[in-house]
Amino acid sequence: MNRIVFTGSFVRKSEPVWSKMSYGLNFWSKGQMEALYLSRDGYLGAVGAFVTQFNHVDGIARSIPVDGDS
C-alpha cells in the first residue's frame, strides 16, 4: 500500500490538519506513502454502510475478500 485516502469534512475543511497529516505520513513512511484527500466525499459513509449490509453472516460483519482471499 502506498496511498492512504482520508475523508470527512473535518479533514477537508482544515488545511492545517491535512498539511500536518501529509507531513507526518511522508516522514514516518520515509516518502514511501502518499496521503490523498477527497473533495467530494459526502456519500462515502452511506456507500460503506450499503456495502457492509451484504457482508454480514449471522449478524457479524466480515471483511471483504481481496485478491482471492476467503
Image: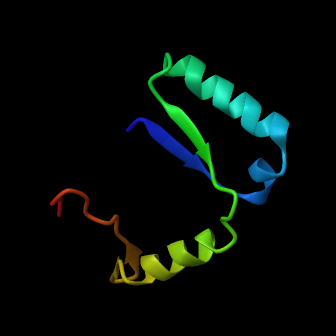
Indicate the quadrant containing the C terminus: top left, top right, bottom left or bottom right.
bottom left
Residue at the extreme front of the image, as rendered: 39
Indicate the quadrant containing the N terminus: top left, top right, bottom left or bottom right.
top left
Q: Residue at x 66, y 65 (%)?
A: 41
Q: Nearer the viewer, residue 8 or 58?
A: 8
Image position, residue 34 (x, y; %): 52, 34
From the viewer's perspective, is 26 left or right of 2? right
Say if 56 sits above or below 2 in the image.
below
Image position, residue 12 (x, y; %): 76, 51
Image position, residue 37 (x, y; %): 64, 48
Residue 9 falls in image quadrant: bottom right
Q: Residue at x 49, y 16 (%)?
A: 30
Image position, residue 32 (x, y; %): 44, 24
Q: Residue at x 40, y 82 (%)?
A: 59
From the viewer's perspective, is 66 left or right of 53? left
Q: How many tags in the picture?
A: 0
Describe the colour scheme in one phrase.
rainbow
Say if 50 sits above or below 63 in the image.
below
